[in-house]
Amino acid sequence: MTPVLLRFTAPADLTLVDWLQLLHPVLMILFVYPVVGATIRLGILVRERRLEINPIAATVPVEHVDHGRWVTTGTVVAVLLALAANLARNGAAAGSAPLLLPAAVALAGCLTLWRARRPAARATGALLSWGALILLVAQPPLWFQGTRPWERVWGNHAISGVLLTGLLLFAMAAAPDIRSRPAWRRLHTGAAFLTALLLAVQAISGGRDLLTLR
C-alpha cells in the first residue's frame, strides 16, 4: 500500500480586523449558545413546577428570567461587535462617529430592561434597542461585504439576526407579564420555538459567511 501523505498549510497571519471579526462568533459560541441551553432547560422546569409535575425550588423561575437577560444582552453586544467588524473591514471607520449614537442607544435600551419595572419603560427600552439595531443594519458602511441585507432575505445572517434580537428583547421586556398572564405565556412559548429556529439559522448562515472572509 502506498502511504498517504497529509499536507498541512500554515494559516495566514490574522490581522486586527480579522480578530475583530472573530469576536462576534466567539461570543455567540462560548457564551450565548450555552446560556441559551440553560435557559431552555430552566424554562422546562418552570413549566413543570407550574403544572405541579416537579416540585422544584421557587428560585428556578427567577433563574430562568436572569438567564434570559444574559442571553439577550450577550446577543445585543455580539451584534454590535459584528457591525463594528464590518465597519472596519469595509474601511469606513473614519466616518463612524454618526453611528456611535444608535449603537449606544441599542446597548442602553437593552440595559434599561434589567432595572425597568413599569410596562411602558420596558416597552420603550426594548423598542429603542431594537430600532437602533435596525437603523445600524441599514447603514451601508456596516453591510457585510457591501451586500444590502434585503437583497437576500432568506438565509441572510443580518436579517435573521435582527429578528432573533427582537424576539429576545420582547421576551426580556415582557418577563413580568409572562409570569402573571396565561395569554402572554402562550405567546412567549410560541416565540421561543421561533427563537430556537432562528438560532439554528444563525449558526448555519454565520458559519457560511465566515468561509467567505478569506
Image (cartoon, helix red, strand yellow):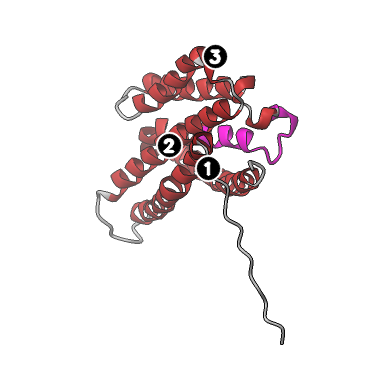
Indicate the position of residue 170 as horizontal and vertical percent values.
Answer: 47, 32
Indicate the position of residue 198 as horizontal and vertical percent values.
Answer: 58, 44
Q: Which residue is identified by label 2?
A: 72
The image quadrant of residue 56 is bottom left
Q: Earlier in the sequence, mark 2 or mark 3?
A: 2
Amino acid under label 2? Thr
Does residue 171 appear in the picture of this structure? yes
Amino acid under label 1? Leu
Magenta run includes residue 71: no
**Nearest to the observer: residue 206 or residue 150:** 206
Q: In the rendered view, tell whether residue 158 sits above or below residue 210.
A: above
Q: Residues within 10 Å of mark 1 (few under 14, many from 20)?
A: few
Numbered label tally: 3
Q: CA distance from mark 3 to mark 1?
A: 24 Å
Magenta run includes residue 163: yes
Amino acid under label 3? Gly
Q: Which residue is identified by label 1?
A: 14
The image quadrant of residue 73 is top left
Indicate the position of residue 146 as horizontal and vertical percent values.
Answer: 68, 27
> Depth-wise, is mark 3 or mark 1 nearer the camera?
1
Which residue is located at x 47 percent, y 40 percent?
23
Q: Which quarter of the image is occupied by the C terminus? A: top right
Q: Residues within 10 Å of mark 3 (few under 14, many from 20)?
A: few
Q: Which quarter of the image is occupied by the N terminus? A: bottom right
Query: Is 76 situated left or right of 210 in this image?
Result: left
Part of the protein shown in magenta: 148-165
Q: CA distance from mark 2 to mark 3?
A: 28 Å
Q: Are marks 2 and 3 in contact (CB under 8 Å)?
A: no
Tag 1 secondary structure: loop
Which residue is located at x 60 percent, y 44 percent?
206
**Nearest to the observer: residue 185 or residue 158:** 158
Q: Which residue is identified by label 3?
A: 95
